[in-house]
Amino acid sequence: MAAWLAVLVSSCGPVVENAPFSARPDTLRPGDLLGPFDGLVVDGETDRPLAGAVVAGAWAFERGIGLQGPAAALEAVAETGADGRYRLKIPADLPRGEGVRLRRFTLIVYRRGYVAWRSDGIFPTGEPRSDFAQQGTRVRLEKWQSSMSHFRHLVFLGGGPAIRAAVAWEVQPAGLELDGASPASASERPAQAARVGSSSALDISPLLSEDEVRGVTGYAGKFEVGKLADRATSDVYDSRHFKASDKPETHDVGLRVWAIGSEAAEAQFRKLLGDLPSAVATEEMGDASLRARGGDVTGFAFLLREKGVVMQLSCGLAQCSEPSMILRLAKLAESHLPEVKLPSPESTGLLPASGPALAPGGKP
């Protein structure tokens, strides 16, 4: 059993990975991804407790032995009272089954007028956070500055339904920024936003169709087409999952796209090259490309530097039985890129928080 597997919750319950944070701020004893979690939210200037902050905890599960893919995501939400305190317990309905493991926990704290706080990173640089603990964390929220970017803030924030509802008001000024307004003027004129709701989200659906997949691989069955489950679609990221109906994951195809500006795209490609299993650099497409292989899944990724785009495909070997098939799928996706509305280069440049991995069904 791998060293990073720590606790077997029950004979059929999830395996729990070692927590990357301590049990409390004053100890080096490791924390527990299962929780419970508690802490205090305060104003970063006055150090006084903050009421009305939304606190969301997210647990991410994966499934598979040797080669893992997303299994489920659970969320618990609280709102701080007058004392500024929060407490979260993991939901009772944990995913079960062979090979299920709890991989990570993320805490997000948000209150309007303040910079969002994540347990795994710091805005706006994205550098890793080192002051989070399972219990007794003092969450210091810094006041929002007019020079800060709402667009970059939303990309950094992520989160589930509760967080998305709390930050909905920021979508309008973020849309103005994408249309060329400065962060300060975008905040002052939210009613004039050209894009609201989900209309500014990246949509890669034109890149690859079911018929195109079948035309390349010869597969005659049906697909259930949706999104990959590891992270939400944003203005700079989207995914597409062709799940073969009534078939194992080795028949699945996945496509994910980052449209994050030239520098960040290069960094993301290097991250894929370093993190994907058995990744080898090639010169088959774009400014740089790679091939990867993990178990019964083959992967391909390429960089388009000028457009600030990275595309990654994953294909099970039961679907892509020949190495040339995944390359043909990648070329089809690239040929449709002019049909996708990409964010303007000056509005991008943040590297996505989640790291890449190759998994069954093209899942990240």
Image (cartoon, rainbow, N blue to C red):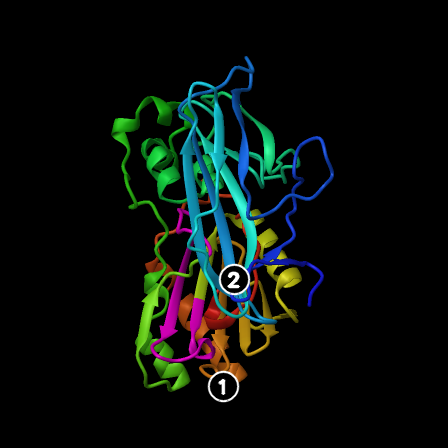
In this view, 276 is above or below 178: below
Q: Tell me which residue sits at (44%, 68%) in the image.
A: 254
In this view, 11 is above or below 168: below
Q: Which residue is mark 1?
A: 321
Residue stretch rendered in magenta on the structure:
230-254
Residue 256 visible within the image: yes
Q: Tell me which residue sits at (66%, 34%) in the image.
A: 24
Residue 350 visible within the image: no
User: Residue 21 versus residue 171: which sits nearer the camera?
Assistant: 21
In this view, 308 is above or below 350: below
- The image position of residue 328, as x and y in percent, is 46, 77
**CA distance separating discs 1 and 2:** 34 Å
- The image position of residue 289, as x and y in percent, is 58, 67
On whether residue 241 falls in the magenta region, the answer is: yes
Q: Which label number is shown at residue 64?
A: none
Question: Within 10 angstroms of label 1, few (less than 14), some, or many (20 or more) residues?
Answer: some
On whether residue 290 falls in the magenta region, the answer is: no
Amino acid carrying label 2: it is Gly
* Residue 192 falls in image quadrant: top left
Question: Within 10 angstroms of label 2, few (less than 14), some, or many (20 or more) residues?
Answer: some
Q: Tell me which residue sits at (64%, 43%) in the image.
A: 31
Q: Which residue is mark 2?
A: 13
Q: Tell me which residue sits at (65%, 39%) in the image.
A: 23
- The image position of residue 143, as x and y in percent, is 49, 20
Left-right relation of 218 to 346: left
Give the SS element for disc 2.
Answer: loop
* Residue 82 falls in image quadrant: top left
Amino acid carrying label 1: it is Ser
